Image: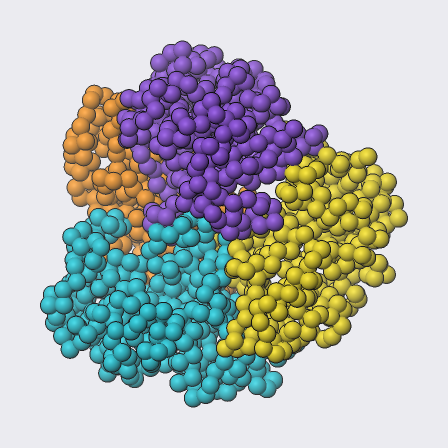
Chain colours: A cyan, B orange, C purple, D yellow
Amino acid sequence: MMIEVGIVGASGYSGTELIRMLSTRSDVSITRLVAATSAGKQVSELYPAFAGVVDLTFESFDADALAGLDVVFIALPSGEAMNIVPQLLNRVGRIIDLGGDFRLPTPELYEQFYLHKHTAPSLLGEAVYGLPELNKHQIVDAHFVANPGCYPTSAILSLLPLLKSGLILPDGIVINSLSGVSGAGRSSSIEMSFAEVNENVWAYKIGKHQHIPEIQTVLEHAARQRVGFSFVPHLIPINRGIYTTIHANLVVSTTTGDVNEVYREFYTDAPFVRIRQTVPQIKDVTMTNFCDIAFFIEPRTNQLIIISTIDNLVKGAAGQAIQNMNIMLGLPEETGLMRKELQHA
Amino acid sequence: MMIEVGIVGASGYSGTELIRMLSTRSDVSITRLVAATSAGKQVSELYPAFAGVVDLTFESFDADALAGLDVVFIALPSGEAMNIVPQLLNRVGRIIDLGGDFRLPTPELYEQFYLHKHTAPSLLGEAVYGLPELNKHQIVDAHFVANPGCYPTSAILSLLPLLKSGLILPDGIVINSLSGVSGAGRSSSIEMSFAEVNENVWAYKIGKHQHIPEIQTVLEHAARQRVGFSFVPHLIPINRGIYTTIHANLVVSTTTGDVNEVYREFYTDAPFVRIRQTVPQIKDVTMTNFCDIAFFIEPRTNQLIIISTIDNLVKGAAGQAIQNMNIMLGLPEETGLMRKELQHA
Amino acid sequence: MMIEVGIVGASGYSGTELIRMLSTRSDVSITRLVAATSAGKQVSELYPAFAGVVDLTFESFDADALAGLDVVFIALPSGEAMNIVPQLLNRVGRIIDLGGDFRLPTPELYEQFYLHKHTAPSLLGEAVYGLPELNKHQIVDAHFVANPGCYPTSAILSLLPLLKSGLILPDGIVINSLSGVSGAGRSSSIEMSFAEVNENVWAYKIGKHQHIPEIQTVLEHAARQRVGFSFVPHLIPINRGIYTTIHANLVVSTTTGDVNEVYREFYTDAPFVRIRQTVPQIKDVTMTNFCDIAFFIEPRTNQLIIISTIDNLVKGAAGQAIQNMNIMLGLPEETGLMRKELQHA
Amino acid sequence: MMIEVGIVGASGYSGTELIRMLSTRSDVSITRLVAATSAGKQVSELYPAFAGVVDLTFESFDADALAGLDVVFIALPSGEAMNIVPQLLNRVGRIIDLGGDFRLPTPELYEQFYLHKHTAPSLLGEAVYGLPELNKHQIVDAHFVANPGCYPTSAILSLLPLLKSGLILPDGIVINSLSGVSGAGRSSSIEMSFAEVNENVWAYKIGKHQHIPEIQTVLEHAARQRVGFSFVPHLIPINRGIYTTIHANLVVSTTTGDVNEVYREFYTDAPFVRIRQTVPQIKDVTMTNFCDIAFFIEPRTNQLIIISTIDNLVKGAAGQAIQNMNIMLGLPEETGLMRKELQHA
């Protein structure tokens, strides 16, 4: 039986990544692609890479046309999903929102960091936060999932086991992340033009990034304690990938074996988290749904330095969304996401 | 039934691309990986990207250990396969050589361009030239295939239909190609270091590149006429991809419709050649086995300008080798190579 | 005595390159910077690189304010200089237009390739074409110079000596050029965004580029014969630089010595043209006013392959404009443009 | 009167940067270029960019030949200068060592981080640490200067004023740096090849980098207190530039004005440090001797986030060495290093 899916916001980087990944599935039928600004155009007209592979046409949003689909992915810029979700809830099987509209608990927090009003505050508690390594049991029963942000995915997966185990102090954590430019979406700004980004680096939204409250809310809720951290994102001249370096203070002197055990135990049933013994590189996770994590104990400062890396468009967006879909539909988590899995398909 | 394959030269860029692509196949078992300099190391030790995906160990070359395999791919630097093939012929099901040792008809031509002696000249006529769009019927029956070079794949696919149809003059053709650096293999030279390649471009081996006689031999044999062309390869700062721009003189004034028809007819049964009506871009073929071709008639000069692009590691190496394997084994040509195909698998 | 200069269009890539280069001169005072969209902003506000170095403010265009300046550079997009020049001619000492508005001989040719009307056709014959290696004697006396385009600079410097000497056939020439993205100006299009340009290449304006008639007009006038060529520009993922590869047919069999002599004789008094014996690389000319040229005789095809490279913002724009200014003002051509020259300053 | 200089290790990235920068000076004569592996070759043979600009030949090391020079720069890999310096001290006017051999106070510390023996331990106290913003008065009288490392330059300039003023806690500081690949020197390793570095990022030498004791020694000595910090360097795919992001804990709640005043007062006489009010970008300092610094107070965590950026080959190597030379010779600090200065020369 075919899983019928629709993608709203299908012409952006996350949307096309969903098309790319879902079009390889024999059990999935991409039924509707909504992209307001490209309505009427063939996918291969806008993205010639899909010629001969995907034979679909972008269309305008129409809630009636989407009604009855098994799964609807929403891959819109922040502030747009909150106008769409109320029209789809209860009319489609499952909704997975890749944007930030339903990840925070209160409209106040949302408005403080997203800088515009939340128009569907009553739905803020409805969505399950779709980080499978944390919430798998809730995702199984969910009809509405808020897919995590890219930075939060790499930061939370790094910190959660450490905080829950009490190995690190919950305060004084420093998170620095480097991101490829696809994380900013398809952009027509001078700032994101090749000549400006190439041979350059800059930090941005220091202390103000909308992923700060997301990281904080999830960590505090899961670790049942207040968590204090600073987060600085940087843009670097690559297309894909997030590289996160975290400094945390160890509670007591700890061995590599101790930390390894904490991580390995926490991620026993997490096929996409790989605990590495060497320094991770972005290229090892590019085009995969893996999150690679390594850690280094620095006796001189009694700090734990954790490094994690993901592909922002896969584990940081489309791949994780598909992982959530698999779990919601009772399929093996890895379906369509791992080479190994494909071997045994 | 499983297809048992071995890869000799498994640790280079073409070798690991074969691992990447074959490891997704449910009908293929990668049985042996030969990599002399890395023998004894796990694949994931050298390439952490494969951790949790490919659980194999590189080993030294041993003809006895490979004997009986259904398919052996050879992905060695030029000059090495000719010492290996004689030991494997008749002991394995099929051999597909991704290098240049068996693509040319005579030892003299080989030695003139490859600048070393050919040690197995008696086998030079044995291999079928593995360009499926040209030789599919011969590949079906072949036990030994010489997989085409990356530049020749893009140049021959562009020119062959035009020469056979008589639309262009067989002389005065100009071929300029741009290549990503993975085409040069895993390299530890200063010349190929990031600081030298980045923000830079250079042409190389002008008039001396070893792909010149390959292009010439194949075109002349297929078009049954002498063909005259100049070929200048350039290195550009990207990882993957070949972009080839060709100028040829039209025999008579010709319409876009005429040229389109020649191409479409020639490639009727060629699922990996896409004739485009807009200018091709490398990113449209990256990580795929497609060759995108477009052409432009320039009335001012009565020339036909043809542009083609491939991923040098896929259609220019590993993907085409797998396409050849599929054909040799009687499988659908697209097996494991096209997203669309996967949908119907 | 100070040379007082103004720059109209000072906030684009060519304009800021003029600021960068002129601000090192002890004999030049940058008096006025016109940039309509940034009027009122400090240079260092828009370009922090200039903080502590250039203390000037962009202003709106006002012909009266520019009147009396010794030199006015115009670095505007095509179609804008023709509205400015008529207001400045006879009111400023010299005008050097870096754009394409005054490089072609007739309004018809201009409109065919620039795709808009020429509003000052009576001035089309007024400007001297500012290629110093060709026109130095005319530039000395000129009050109005049309600075050459970047592609034409590299193509004409490569071909002119060969055509004048009769070494190559004037027909059947093929010019392929690769350009860094700064050549397209400061751009806010999706097409020029980092994620689209990185790891990608494309050709554009095949047979239609506005530099085609410029190359043709200059070559035909200088060589006093009809010249036939095809020109295909490509965009590659680097910031600066043009790399041009040209194929031409030799009239008779020719030696390397013959060609060398033709070039060396022609460029005896051209301090910025370097005839190289090895393959040029873009990085050898980056941030300099040099044009490096090398050639290769291909006996197999009786063709001469010429490769030239420049920095599109220096010899292809601002540097050449300053070279023209030097000549117009009776200064040594190299003033402020060559490291060697600075040593002896 | 000409300043006669020699460069030992003239063919690496720092060495050629010295050539590039010094060759523009009218008061400097580059007399000898020592490069063991390229002895006998012309500079322009190895680096065609210098053709027509620098007419010198690399030679082998010969202390006698260097004797009597006004200034000798040493730009050798770590571990080599300590064999050279003893032969030159007292025989040349001034020595400026760009490497790490003479930056640390004890052979024990050196051997712990550089992992080889120090062969000239008696000279370890002889060199003045050549950070002009800290040590100008000592540099004036110095005959032997140890030029700072690139990471230490960006970290120390960021932290020193804050530590001396007591604004931040001397403990719990986190330093993350991103470096372009030229920082690793001219390299022929696979690791540094374009295909590996491009579209990739990695951290390295975590807790073990040889710049850790340099930063610590200098900060502790200058601030007269113990300083505790963690330092993680990352390699990113750009050629030039260092981008350093630092987290420090504020002692008490502090205003932007307070911090600004501390910085501005400390850097009153430092023409190459620019305190910025917006987020720095690498491209604003590329090819200059500037260090741009900005800071951000994060009330949520009571932390101060400081970002600084330099060109690793200029302020992080050759430019700073020339700044030191200027000071040692009693010249204005900016001579040959700043565009503005050139205007008034």
Rendered view: C239 above or below C327: below
What is the quadrant of residue C224 in the picture? top left
Q: Can you give x and y, in whole percent of width and height, for residue D12 in the image?
A: 66, 45
Q: Can you give x and y, in whole percent of width and height, for residue C116 in the image?
A: 28, 30
Q: Is residue B151 visible?
A: no
What is the quadrant of residue B255 in the picture? top left
Horizontal side of D152 relative to C7 (left or right) equals: right
Horizontal side of D92 relative to B160 (left or right) equals: right
Rendered view: B269 above or below A274: above
Q: Can you give x and y, in whole percent of width and height, for residue B220 in the image?
A: 30, 28
Relative to the observer, which residue lies in front, D173 or A275?
D173
Relative to the observer, which residue lies in front, D329 or C19?
C19
Q: Quadrant of the N terminus of chain A?
A: bottom left
User: Which residue is farthest front?
Assistant: C64
**Number of marks:** 0
Relative to the observer, which residue lies in front, C24 or B180?
C24
Q: Residue at x 63, y 78 (%)?
A: D251
Q: Residue at x 19, y 71 (%)?
A: A71
User: Which residue is farthest right?
Assistant: D90
Q: Is residue A25 visible?
A: yes
Q: Can you give x and y, in whole percent of width and height, for residue D190 in the image?
A: 54, 53
Q: Residue at x 34, y 37 (%)?
A: C203
Q: Quadrant of the C terminus of chain A?
A: bottom left
Rendered view: D237 above or below B155: below
Q: Residue at x 57, y 86 (%)?
A: A251
